[in-house]
Image (cartoon, grey):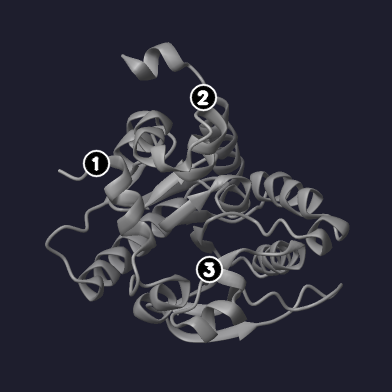
Amino acid sequence: MKTAYEKVQAARAKGRPSGLGFIRGIFSDFIELHGDRRFADDTAIVGGIARLREKPVTVIAMEKGGNTKEKLFRNFGSPNPEGYRKALRLMKQAEKFHRPVICFVDTSGAFCGIGAEERGQGQAIAENLVEMMGLRVPIIAVLIGEGGSGGALALAVADEVWMLENAFYSVISPEGCASILWKDAKKNKEAAECLKLTAEDMKRMRVVERVIPEEGRTFPEIYAYLESLLWNTLEEKENRDLSALLDARYQRFRQFGPMQEMQE
């Protein structure tokens, strides 16, 4: 069994598919839509309209890029405020046309540059949290790699959140945590254990509903598994009364926090 930090390394591994890989592997007829209609088109977040079998959906993904040139173009998967605003624009469009929303999360965190702060990074993330909580269509979020703090949470307020086995979800990176607690980033392995950031930890603490197995599977096999799982889950969500769907989403987040029960 892998240690917590080995799973962090697997989530960051070179060649691991990022957002566009999952979109292309699961959906058909993907049409990318661009821009937040305010400032720019953030290439760290891609989104648009696609088909899940015959069902029209809105799909949004964080994209890190493959080689060095692509990573620079995608800002290493760290979105600016306009990326989150683009995502919210697409979600509100999905709500207008009654399309379910599917988000793929893979980021070390929101970009923390001066320009991002000047353009309202915190506000953009907060607006997504508020709007997603009340979005009147089903939402599924899948953590496929790194789930870094509020930058990841901004696309993960959903009816159900799933994680790949080798993904992680944390308020801070192990290196950042080690630097703060022990003034030594080399204690990242100890920090990873303390943070309880693995998919199994998240499932036990009810932060995610499902862990997607990876061991012994190729990514095309994982895409096929997710395609079937998404189809069945969205069929169930779309058949629910809207008020019940929204209440369940609200209650999902309200139940976080009983740490004594989680530790037991």
Q: Nearer the viewer, mark 2 or mark 3?
A: 3
Query: Is residue 121 depicted above or below 221 in this figure?
Result: above
Q: How many marks?
A: 3
Mark 1 vs mark 3, CA separation in Å:
27 Å
Q: Nearer the viewer, mark 1 or mark 2?
A: 1
State the image quarter where residue 9 is shown.
bottom left
Horizontal side of residue 95 vs 249, given as left or right? right
Identity of the residue drawn at 48% across and 51% down: 147
Estimate the x, y position of residue 155 in percent, counting from the top left.
Answer: 59, 55
Q: Are marks 1 and 3 in contact (CB under 8 Å)?
A: no
Q: Does residue 48 appear in the picture of this structure?
A: no
Estimate the x, y position of residue 37 in percent, counting from the top left.
Answer: 83, 75
Q: Secondary structure at mark 2?
A: loop
Q: Are marks 1 and 2 in contact (CB under 8 Å)?
A: no
Estimate the x, y position of residue 104 in percent, counting from the top left.
Answer: 48, 63
Give the amino acid type for the residue marked by disc 1 in the picture.
Thr
Identity of the residue drawn at 66% across and 52% down: 135
Point out the tag, 2 or 3, that comes first from the N-terminus: 3
Mark 1 vs mark 2, CA separation in Å:
28 Å
Identity of the residue drawn at 81% across and 59% down: 114
Give the amino acid type for the residue marked by disc 2 in the picture.
Gln
In the rendered structure, find residue 61 and report the number of the disc placed on it: 3
Report the quarter where the C terminus lies.
top left
